[in-house]
Structure formats: C-alpha cells, structure tokens
Image: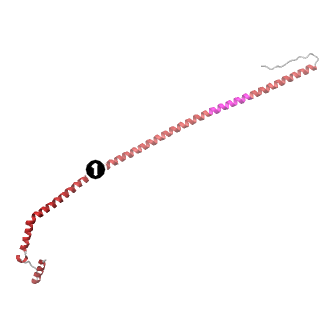
Amino acid sequence: MELFTEASIILASNGSFGINTDIFETNLVNQLIILGSVVFFGRDFLSESLGQRQAEIISGVEDSEKRLNEATTRLAEAKKQLSQARVIMDQVRKETSSTKAALLEADYNQAKLELSKRFSSASSILMFRERQILSEIKQYVSVLALELVVSKIEKKAGLESELSSYMQESINMVGAASPAPALSVEIGEEA
C-alpha cells in the first residue's frame, strides 16, 4: 500500500509518469530477498503441498475415470439386458397370441363337438319318441279296430239270435195255422 502512495507522490511531483530506477528507494532488494527466502524455505513445503494436491487431483481423476468406465459398462449391460428383455417380451407376446388362438380353437372345437353330441342325442330321443308314439297309435288303432269288430260281432250275434227266435216263432205260427204236424226246426249258430 505504501508503494501506491509513493507512486502517487512521484507522479504528483514530476507531473509525469516514470520508473524509479533507484533500487534501494523502491525497496526492490527487500522484496527479492523475501521472495527468494519464501521460495528457498517454502519450496519443500509448497512442493509437498502441491504434490499432495496433485496426487489428490490425479486420484480423483482416476477414480472418476474408473467410475465412468464402470458406469459405461453397466450402461452397456443394462442396454443388453433391455434388448434381451424386449426380445423375451416379444416372444411371450407371440406365444400368448398363439396360445390364445389355440385355446379359442380348442374351445370352438369342443363346443362344436358337444353341440353335435347334443343334437345327435336330441335327434335320437325325438326319433325314439316318434317310434314310441307311432307304436302307441298303432296299438290304440288296433284296440279300437278290435273293439269295433267285437261290437259288430256281438251285434250280429244278437241279431242272429233275434232272427233265429223270430224264425222259430214264424215257423211255430205257420205250423199252428196249418193242420199238418208241426215240425220243429231249430236254427243253430254256425261255428
């Protein structure tokens, strides 16, 4: 600071700017001695301190490079795993799609088969019921026909007996009216 005040005094006294060449007046020797002693005595300390600092910086840089290499390696591995995972996911999607299609096809075939079985079963049941109903109708018609025949036979038998008794009465009446001996003729049923 003192140097600045002296410089302003020098400038003010001469009125111009200039360099003071007087070594002792400018205190240049003292400054060089201080600087030399600082360099001579502080060289070991400064070199050791700077060496430590340099070693720390180099260590930090090497550590950073090592971490960068590790991170790069991990990034490459992660990208590789990601691509493998994408390939696996695509395979799973394709397998899922094909499995889904196969399951749907199998369900369709099974449903078709079951419907076919049910239709066949229903068809056979209907055919059986139709045959059974036809059989029952035939039996009913047969029974009705037999009843009709029996009733007609009974009616004829009843008429024949009436006719036979009428004829007997007629013969008896004719025979009673005529003087000739009465013949009794019986009309029997023919077998």
Dominant SS type (magenta): helix
For the magenta stretch, what is the residue range?
A: 130-147
Residue at the image position 56 percent from the left and 35 percent from the top: 121
Left/right of residue 59 with respect to residue 132 in the rendered view: left
The residue most toward the top is: 181
Residue at the image position 92 percent from the left and 20 percent from the top: 176
Left/right of residue 79 with respect to residue 30 in the rendered view: right
Would you call the spot at circle 1 few (<14 residues within 10 Å), some (14-19), or many (20 or more)? few
x and y percentages locating residue 41 in the rendered image: 8, 66
Left/right of residue 89 with respect to residue 113 in the rendered view: left
Is residue 144 in the magenta section? yes
x and y percentages locating residue 116 in the rendered image: 53, 37
Is residue 85 in the magenta section? no
The residue most toward the right is: 179
Q: Is mark 1 on a helix, strand or loop?
A: helix
Whether residue 40 is situated above or below residue 157 in the rendered picture: below
Residue at the image position 74 percent from the left and 29 percent from the top: 148
Quarter of the image for the N terminus: give it: bottom left
Q: Nearer the viewer, residue 126 or 53?
A: 53
Quarter of the image for the C terminus: give it: top right
Q: Mark 1 points at which residue?
A: 77
Left/right of residue 61 with respect to residue 151 in the rendered view: left
Residue 124's image quarter? Answer: top right
Whether residue 106 is situated above or below residue 181 in the rendered picture: below
x and y percentages locating residue 28 in the rendered image: 7, 74
